[in-house]
Image (cartoon, grey):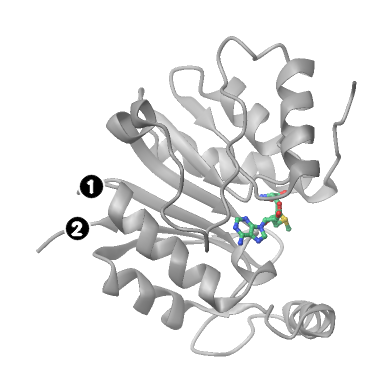
Amino acid sequence: MDNRLFFPATERNRKSIGEVLSRILVKKGFILEIGSGSGEHGVAFQKSFPEIIWQSSDPELIHRKSISSWINHEELSLKMPQPLDIDVEKTPWNVPSDILLSIQGIISINMIHIASWDCTKSLFIEAGKLLNDGKFLMLYGPFKINNKHISQSNKLFDSSLKMQNKFWGVRDLIEVSEEATKNGFIKDEVIRMPANNFTIIYRKFSS
Ligand SMILES: C[S@@+](CC[C@H](N)C(=O)[O-])C[C@H]1O[C@@H](n2cnc3c(N)ncnc32)[C@H](O)[C@@H]1O
């Protein structure tokens, strides 16, 4: 059965995110994606970066079914594992040991503003446990800078998120980075992306 979902934003942002990935990925190991949604990013990046193994995940069954359908549709089932059921708040995450042995990074695209603040905290706590020194946690999405929106459209988007769920909202980069620091990450790169988004790359670093 074809359970593929189509998230239009993935069409718009995959090229610019892929350009960042092409700079930071090393040519082996697993990438663990948190909140993979439809799975369109996962299959696109698995095809662009065949040397790595893209491990997608999502807590929603409808999304995991979509991811599986995309994997089948793109004929990647021999290369790309089936999605994991990971809710960032349900810890410890159930990640197979072969992934833990060669994980090179964790990526979450457009997730932390569509989940509670506790999800951001949990994301950094668990990522801090799973990643060794030098490995990265990459976030993509809208952020406030110095607690200010960078555009009117982001401000409106933030209000619309909060109307849907009072615990959602565009996060402030300083507050997010404080959670990173608490869990052994340094902020390595802040990259301005199209459509008022950012990619933030944190690296695990034990002093
Ligand atoms: C806006 S969608 C983004 C999906 C995809 N990353 C993309 O860019 O198209 C947000 C995703 O975060 C997932 N999500 C929400 N709460 C989550 C949680 N507590 N743990 C992990 N993922 C979560 C949702 O199921 C959804 O797939």
At 63% from the left and 60% from the top, the residue drawn is: 111
At 53% from the left and 32% from the top, the residue drawn is: 55
Query: To which quarter of the image does residue 171 belong?
Result: bottom right
Q: Is residue 156 left or right of residue 123?
A: right
Report, in whole angstroms, how far the alpha carbon at label 1 lies from the one at label 2. 6 Å
The residue tagged 1 is: 134
At 86% from the left and 38% from the top, the residue drawn is: 5
Q: CB atoms at circles 1 and 2 under 8 Å apart?
A: yes
- In front of the other: 43 or 84: 84
- In front of the other: 78 or 157: 78
Q: Position of residue 44 (x, y in %)?
A: 66, 29
Q: Position of residue 66 (x, y in %)?
A: 79, 34
Secondary structure, mark 2, is loop
Q: Residue furthest left?
A: 207
At 49% from the left and 44% from the top, the residue drawn is: 20
Q: Residue furthest bottom?
A: 147
Which quarter of the rendering shows the C terminus?
Answer: bottom left
Q: Is residue 144 shown above or below 1?
A: below
- In front of the other: 33 or 145: 33
Secondary structure, mark 1, is loop
Image quarter for ligand 1: bottom right
Q: Is residue 180 left or right of residue 176?
A: left
Q: Position of residue 15 (x, y in %)?
A: 65, 39
Name the amino acid type tagged 1: Gly
The residue tagged 2 is: 205
- Bin the neighbour count of mark 1 within 10 Å (Cα to Cα): few under 14, some 14-19, many 20 and up: some
Name the amino acid type tagged 2: Phe
Query: To which quarter of the image does residue 102 belong?
Result: top left
Q: Position of residue 135 (x, y in %)?
A: 29, 45
